[in-house]
Amino acid sequence: MTSSQDAIRWPKLVQDCLRREIGPESTIPDPTTDLIETGVLDSMGWVSFLRTIESASGVDELGSLLTDARPSLESIFQALRDARADRAPLETQSLVANQPAARFRAVVTGSCMATGSRTIPSEEVDWAFGMPEGKLRKRAGIESLAYAAEGETELTLGARAAQQALHAAGCGAQELDWIIATSETHRGYPSLAAQLHSQLLARETCGALDVGGACLGLLNGLAVAQGLISSGQARIIAVVTADVHSRLFTPGRVAGEFGGLFGDGASAFLLRAPHGSEAQPSYRLGEFFFGCAGQYAGAIRVADTADGQLDVHFDGEALSRAAVTRLEKVILDLESRSGIARSSLQGLATHQPNPRLVTLLAKQCGLSLDKFPAVAQIYGNLGSSTCGAALDSILRSSQTQPPEERGAIFLASLGPGLLFGGGWLYSPRAKP
Amino acid sequence: MTRLLITEVTRMGPAFCVIGLQRDKEKIHSVRPVSPNTNGWRHFPHQRGDVLQCELIPFCGAKPHVEDRVSMRGFQKDSSVSEAETVTYLKKAEIAHSLLELFGCPVHPNKSGSGLFANPPEAKRSICGTETRNLRLEFCANELRATLVLSSGEVLRDLPVVDRDWRDFIDAALAGSRGANRLGRLERFLNSQFHYKILSCPHHFIRLGLTRPFHEVCWLMLDTLFPLPKPEWLEEF
């Protein structure tokens, strides 16, 4: 918008907002009039008026700009002009098409995971689903599962993870430009991202976006966040995953061979635009790629039935084969695209359908199992949060090393469809 | 004589509004001592956590300020309790877990602006404690405002903060002697360190109050926020 357009737009917008406070028939006072001193508004009405303008104009923190100013329309016009001048660099940045993409790659400044607070031995889950005792441990390698306690939901787990990630980054929720959420179990509206927005008390002009993809959700969310940051549309974004399977995949609704694999958890990552002088050396997001191998779409399907039950089609054998093959291929592609050898990796945050498949994948890739954080073994398959829990674990363990010795991290995941995706993170200070 | 544990000291224009807890057999309930002539106190030298001896006339104020009692003499300090202990007593007094329970009536958003209000004939009381899942303070146009999430998940936006100690803390943070960019530093503090200090405090607790009827409605206010601010926090920003 040009300054001449501003000159027309702001007075009308401000007058409209003022009429909401003082009534549609009231006379608009002269721009220099002190609105409080002359009794047009009381102090409460003045704040309310400013809030209305913030909401209508998209200019945040108008109140802060006016703290020491006279409460008049003229002061508001000046504050709006100043706010617009401050924003110009960001808008200009977003229009710069020829900048090298790496300059705007998002930095991961905080992360956290949260799991359901009940730890259930896998034998108890065997029993609950009517399976022979020890089946989950022997066949899938699952030792225990994290189940949500009463009162724990996708929202509470996600909010907990997000708040701790914000804390880790020394960032306030009011600084967020976007909250991107993903969950394969949250149903209903308001959506998870919208509810997180309220729970975190983000500012009204912070966007809230839900992305799908089930177990691939984290990668989808990170890729969207990377796009928003690299285009200059956002500076700080929280990507949150949260899944509570234990209330959805219950005994009697689904078979134990499927439902028994899943636990409850959440993860959160705080991404921000690099600003050159990072206080803490942090990982940066590299590139992402995605695809869909439709020939495996029939291996897993979950749908609601008319009687409120779940129709689950789960071909465990076919899915296992497809999962390992496809994840191995994604890792191979990641190596080619990034030029990073798998042997130099800090770790791999992959989807973990069950621990046995992780062991198999490590073997197929010629990697030590230590490179894959044990998530499914302890907590069960956490859906979209499995990758997140693994990534958080690798990021935390890397903090004990000097930045120049930190290896890259590969992300690889799958979702029903069969969706697949990969991406990487790297430490900018790492030795080549 | 009545023993009153002081739990609220709020700013009300140039005066202060005071609320305390009184034990009545096994029950603990809130009492608002008011002077015979006005609702506030121009001078109130006591702190929260002080136990004061006072003489109150057993008279109930007009709805919803049913906690009002006329104080016939000055206050005499008897003893004091810690902040954490004060909160323990507050949790035994009026407490709510949802918006509807707060004042025993529906609470309405201000459709034309910010804040929330209750209708005086519907409200059963004017003060109530509650736990919060999240809370933020914001300084906007010289007004301190709170936005919070109740344990029920309901969000209350833009409540004026009238807690004397928090308002004093903000005034001290913005004092001219504190150097440049004071407002920016304060906002940064409120948006980060403050949040962690408050939410990680084991005795974090708030009390919400209703204003006296104004244009036929009573506005919600954040009367008390525990923990109270510590002077050394000013050194952190």
Image: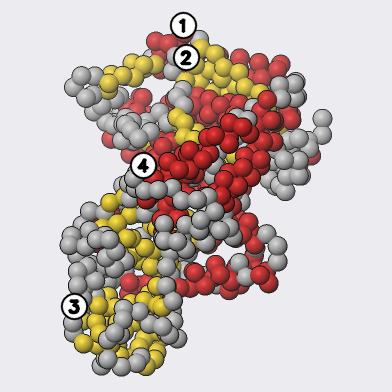
Q: Residue at x 21, y 25 (%)?
A: A308
Camera-side mark, 4 or 3 = 3
- Marks 1/2 in contact by CB < 8 Å: the verdict is yes
Q: How many discs mark residues in the rendered view?
A: 4
Q: Residue at x 29, y 25 (%)?
A: A254
Q: Separation of disc 3 and disc 1 at Cα?
A: 76 Å
Asked whether residue A280 is in view, the answer is: yes
**Mark 4: which secondary structure?**
loop
The residue under label 1 is A295
- Marks 2/4 in contact by CB < 8 Å: the verdict is no
Disc 4 residue type (three-letter): Thr
Camera-side mark, 3 or 1 = 3
Disc 1 residue type (three-letter): Gln
Q: Separation of disc 4 and disc 3 at Cα?
A: 43 Å
In the depicted view, which residue is nearer to us: B201 or B126? B126
In the depicted view, which residue is nearer to us: A21 or B36? A21
Disc 3 residue type (three-letter): Cys
Q: Which mark is residue A418?
A: 2
Q: Separation of disc 2 and disc 3 at Cα?
A: 69 Å
The residue under label 3 is B60
Q: Position of residue A176 (x, y in %)?
A: 55, 42
